[in-house]
Image (tube, rainbow, N blue to C red):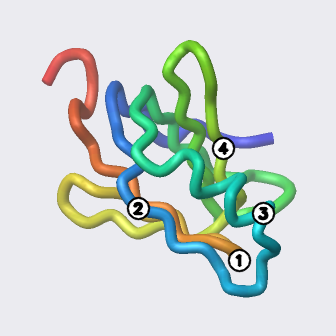
Amino acid sequence: MSKLIKDYFWTKLSDIKVSENLTQDQKYTRLQYLGFVGNMKLYESVNKHPGKFFAYIDNGMKYYRTSCGELVKNGNSITVITDHAKYTFDIIYPDYYD
């Protein structure tokens, strides 16, 4: 189970740094979403990984979900640091009313 923290109207997955321990296929699976733009929902894990966060971004045609990890907010960007990658999302439009 997870708890919705924030629904960001429009964001861009602007940077992905992957672990060197991953296979080429695992790296490609993540890196193919670099530059992906869509609606992002930020969640906190409640049961499986309490206190950890993950992001789910979709554009109505495809989606990407990070693993659970640490959360860093810095101005108009949000970073989720997992065991295998570091994802940075730039907030383009925070919500429908901004």
Q: CA distance from mark 2 to mark 1?
A: 16 Å
Q: Quadrant of the N terminus?
A: top right
- Gap between marks 1 and 4 measured at Cα: 14 Å
Q: CA distance from mark 3 to mark 4?
A: 14 Å
Q: Badge 4 is on which residue?
A: 65
Can you identify the residue that label 2 sits on?
Answer: 15
Q: Earlier in the sequence, mark 2 or mark 1?
A: 2
Numbered marks: total? 4
Residue at the spot of label 1? 83
- Which amino acid type is marked by label 3? Gln
Q: Secondary structure at mark 4?
A: strand
Q: Residue at x 64, y 56 (%)?
A: 30
Query: Dot 1 surroundings within 10 Å: few (below 14), some, or many (20 or more)?
Result: few
- Residue in front for this viewpoint, 36 or 39: 36
Q: Which residue is mark 3?
A: 26
Crowding at label 3, few (<14), some or many (≥20) Cα neighbours within 10 Å? few
Question: What kind of residue is marked 1?
Answer: Asp
47 over 39 or under it: above or below: below
Pick whichever, 52 or 14, lies toward us.
14
Q: Residue furthest right?
A: 48
Q: CA distance from mark 2 to mark 3?
A: 16 Å
Marks 3 and 1, how far apart at CA: 13 Å
Instruction: Indicate left or right for 47 with 19 as reference.
Output: right
Pair 2/4: label in front = 2
Instruction: Kindly state the secondary structure of the residue where label 3 is placed.
Output: helix
Compare marks 3 and 1 and give the one earlier in the sequence.
Answer: 3
* Residue drawn at x 25%, y 66% as measured from the top left: 74
* Residue 82 in the image: above or below residue 64: below
Q: Earlier in the sequence, mark 3 or mark 4?
A: 3
